[in-house]
Structures are given as structure tokens and as C-alpha cells.
Image (cartoon, helix red, strand yellow):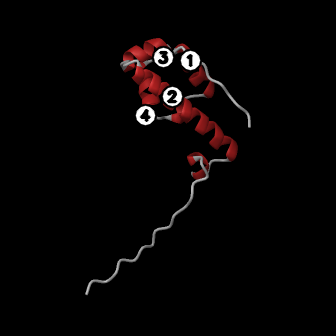
Amino acid sequence: MPRPKRDDSKITHSSGNVFADLGFSEPEATVHRMRSELMIEIEKMIQARHLTQTDAAKILQVSQSRISDLRRGKVEKFSLDMLVTFASRMGRSVLMKVA
């Protein structure tokens, strides 16, 4: 007779911010989340316009390797200022809300 499998898994509920869950302080986690959300939106803009990394780099006035960093989600390589500038160069604005 087969022995029943033992389930040692533990479910940890998210705080709603993966960066806080990873141990970043609340202020750091908030900034990381904002940067990652902006990066995702900028990537969507690039995809919607069917831009190559080279074309996106020209529009955003950065090197192609910076676009590669953006696409790979390297949050630590981009400031909020730079990401807001990218959105502006793509013809979009960024609105901020303090809650």
C-alpha cells in the first residue's frame, strides 16, 4: 500500500508589494514598486509601437544596452526621474498620487 505524501508547504500571504515581501524597508519597497510599474508601462509602449531596441534607444536617447536593461526588468539601474523622462519622450505623462 502506497504511503500518503506529506505536504510541508507553507503559504505566506503577500503584502501587496513583492519588494516589501523580499525584505526591503517600506520606503525602498515603495520606490522599487513605482519604478517597476513605470518600467512595465514603458515596455508596453515600446511593444505597442513595434519598436526594435535600437529604435526605442533613439527615441529615449539612450544606448541600446539601456533598453535591454529595461526589458530585462533591472529595476536598480533606473531612477524614477529617468523613467518619467522616458515616458515623456514616448509622448506620455506620468501622474503621481499621494495617499
- Mark 4 or mark 3: whose residue is earlier in sequence: 3
Q: Mark 1 points at which residue?
A: 92
Q: How far apart are marks 1 and 4 (CA)?
A: 22 Å
Q: Is residue 66 visible?
A: no
The amino acid pointed to by label 4 is Arg
Locate the N terminus by quadrant: bottom left
Q: Which residue is drawn at 39% across and 14% down?
A: 55
Q: Which residue is drawn at 45% across and 72% down?
A: 8
In this orientation, which residue lies closer to the viewer: 34 or 98?
98
Report if the CB atoms under discs 2 and 1 are less than 8 Å apart. yes
- Mark 3 or mark 2: whose residue is earlier in sequence: 2
Q: Mark 3 points at which residue?
A: 62
Judge left or right: residue 99 versus residue 93: right
Q: How far apart are marks 4 and 3 (CA)?
A: 16 Å
Residue at the farthest right position: 99
Q: Name the residue under label 4.
A: 72
Residue 22: x %, y % from top left: 57, 51
- Mark 1 or mark 4: whose residue is earlier in sequence: 4
